[in-house]
Image (cartoon, grey):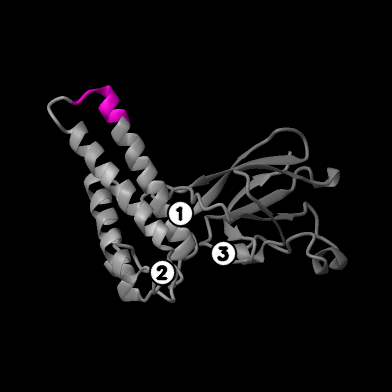
Amino acid sequence: MSNDWFPNRRTSQLAMAKNWVTILDNMGHQWDIPAERVADLSNITAEAEAALSAANSAGRNPALNQAMWTAFGKMADNMRDMRRRHLFMPPLTEAHWVSLGMRLPDTTPTTIGPPTSVVTAEVSYPHKNSLALRVVPMPGSRYDDRAEWGFRIYYGVIPQIAASEEMTIERQYLRREPANPEELTQSYFTRRKHSVIEFNYDNSGMKCFICVRYENGKGDKGPWGPMGNAFVP
């Protein structure tokens, strides 16, 4: 793991284990770590050091290599278990954690802003009274792969004849061609890049305006994409 506290290199692992043994010999009783745990770690560390030395000798062979991997695996498991069971703050202080070679816990929340990618909808006509949308990033943008973000599809249609006052009040139809996406009357949220808008039968031939942008479940929003239009088949 790239964010793991345990070193990747065996020489670094061994150096950390030997450092733990030295510190725990002096401080283990203050941190309520049983003496047998410290002694066990000391013995396991010595075994790992001997196994590494044998594996690096002129007589190295597959058996010695396997013995080394086994010894270092045992040492790593012991140290991980000790950290999980015994090394807490307090009684350890931040200075103690640093002396043991571990990173301090990060209590600062990571701020990740909303998407900056701009997306648009490519329109196709799967069957009558429907428009199929494929959400694609604009040139210079790419999909945002964070799972909490999806797409808000905004759309609105202009009737072939003047809509009644009741229809416009209910925002079923647009009164005129929209000047910006905020004037679009309907929307829905999806996490899919492909979706279909189904229209009423009497919407056939109407002009539909469409715009897409990123949104999450909390209502946070990304930038508007370009507004396009298509006729309902």
Does any portion of residue 140 appear in the rendered image? Answer: yes
| Residue under pointer 2 | 106
**Circles 3, 1 touching at the beta carbon (< 8 Å):** no
- Residue in view at x 34 percent, y 75 percent: 94
Sequence-wise first label, 3 or 1: 1
Extreme residue toward the left, this view: 58
Q: Nearer the viewer, mark 3 or mark 2?
A: 2
How crowded is the residue under tag 2: few (<14 C-alpha within 10 Å), some, or many (20+)?
Answer: few
| Residue under pointer 3 | 221
Sequence-wise first label, 2 or 1: 1
Sequence-wise first label, 3 or 2: 2
Residue 231 coordinates in the image, percent (x, y): 69, 44
Residue 191 coordinates in the image, percent (x, y): 63, 49
Look at label 1 and name its amino acid.
Asp
Residue 214 left/right relative to 165: left
Would you say residue 214 sits in the magenta stretch?
A: no
Would you say residue 61 sits in the magenta stretch?
A: yes
How crowded is the residue under tag 3: few (<14 C-alpha within 10 Å), some, or many (20+)?
Answer: some
The segment highlighted magenta reads 60-66
Residue 20 coordinates in the image, percent (x, y): 30, 60
Look at label 3 and name its amino acid.
Lys
Label 3 to label 2: alpha-carbon separation: 28 Å
Q: Nearer the viewer, mark 3 or mark 1?
A: 1
Label 2 to label 1: alpha-carbon separation: 21 Å
Look at label 2 and name its amino acid.
Asp
SS class, disc 1: helix
Whether 132 is drawn above or below 18: the answer is above
Residue 8 left/right relative to 113: left
| Residue under pointer 1 | 81
Q: Residue 22's image quarter?
A: bottom left
